Amino acid sequence: MTDYKRDVDLATLWPTIVSEAEAAAQAFPMLEDFYRRNIIQHENFSQALAYVLAEKLLDGHAGGAEARADQLKQWRSYLLLQMVAQSDIEHAALHDLLCQLQSNASIKDHYTPLLHFASYQALQCHRFAHYCWHSDQRAMASYIQGRVVSLFGVDIHPGARIGKGIFIDHAVGVVIGETAVVEDNVTLFQNVTLGGTGKGSGDRHPKLREGCFVGSGAVIFGNIEIGAGAKVAGGATVVNDIPAGTTVVGPKGRVLSNRD
């Protein structure tokens, strides 16, 4: 995918987001409270991320307004504590956001993925679920996974290992199994499945190495390796290892050479 370059980096991303949110709030008074709650009131990116995700994760059936407000505070505090315990969550979330901004020319600002993109929000929820899964908080991990499925139509097992700089476009229908590995700078489109082959336990899901691209509707089954920089075309079915830098097309996963 061709990068869509922006003059922003990790150091300037948050101040840019705040400035844009302030301008949007002034231009659209009906949305002022929305921008203030989600961005402007927060001191840094991690606080904003925790708030945005807390609003998604709280139990939609919780009592009245007072009960919901209390639950929102609890979720926000809980997510912030997890980011303190595991700083890689915020680090990866920032890289994911930059990746979205660099890869998607349709985004005209710097806050849209954080506030509006199901793909970005689902991925960040998974990062918290993954930490919970591996820190003796499996009830929380399963709850987060279930909420993500209900909210976004994305099913990522908390055990799956996902790197940073991940671009998931649209995300609806994405399924990633427990022992899957997705390394840094991978792109996944909607309706992608990284699934098993019916094996009951053990290492049974795909390993996507750095820089892979997987098109819409592709299905990849089993404990196989998709090499660094490989491309899996939309609709392809893959059940065997794919060498680095190659392209796979068609329902039977035909491998093209680098010259094709």
Image (cartoon, grey):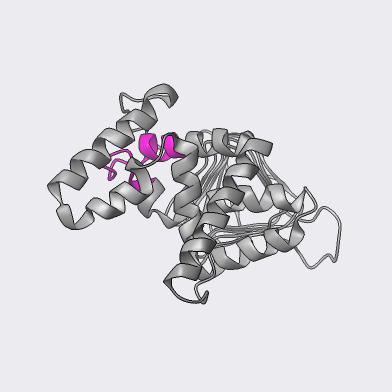
Q: In the image shown, does 3 or 150 lie closer to the viewer?
A: 150
**Horizontal side, residue 149 vs residue 18: left or right:** right
Count of marks placed on residues: 0
Q: Quadrant of residue 9?
A: top left
At 29% from the left and 49% from the top, the residue drawn is 35
Instruction: Please report the residue visible at 62 percent of the width from the left and 49 percent of the height from the top.
Output: 128
Decide which of 65, 189 is in the foreground and name it.
65
Whole-percent x, y for residue 167 in the image: 48, 44
Identify the residue at the far front of this view.
66
Q: Residue at x 61, y 61 (%)?
A: 144
- Residue 167, magenta (yes or no): no
Start-end of magenta stretch: 97-113
Tell me what residue is drawn at x 50 percent, y 51 percent: 233
The quadrant where residue 109 appears? top left
Taking 131 as reference, is 137 above or below it? below
Q: Residue 165: horizontal and vertical position, in percent?
A: 52, 36
Q: Is residue 125 left or right of residue 20?
A: right
Question: Image quadrant for the N terminus?
Answer: top left
* Residue 6 location, quadrant: top left
Side (left or right) of 98 relative to 140: left
| Residue 229 drawn at (x, y percent) | 57, 35
- Note whether residue 191 is visible: no
**Is residue 97 shown above or below 199?**
above
Residue 188 lies, with reference to residue 84, above or below; the image says: below
Q: Position of residue 85 (x, y in %)?
A: 68, 38
Q: Can residue 253 be seen?
A: yes
In the image, is residue 102 part of the stretch drawn in magenta?
yes
**In the orientation shown, which residue stands out farthest toward the left?**
27
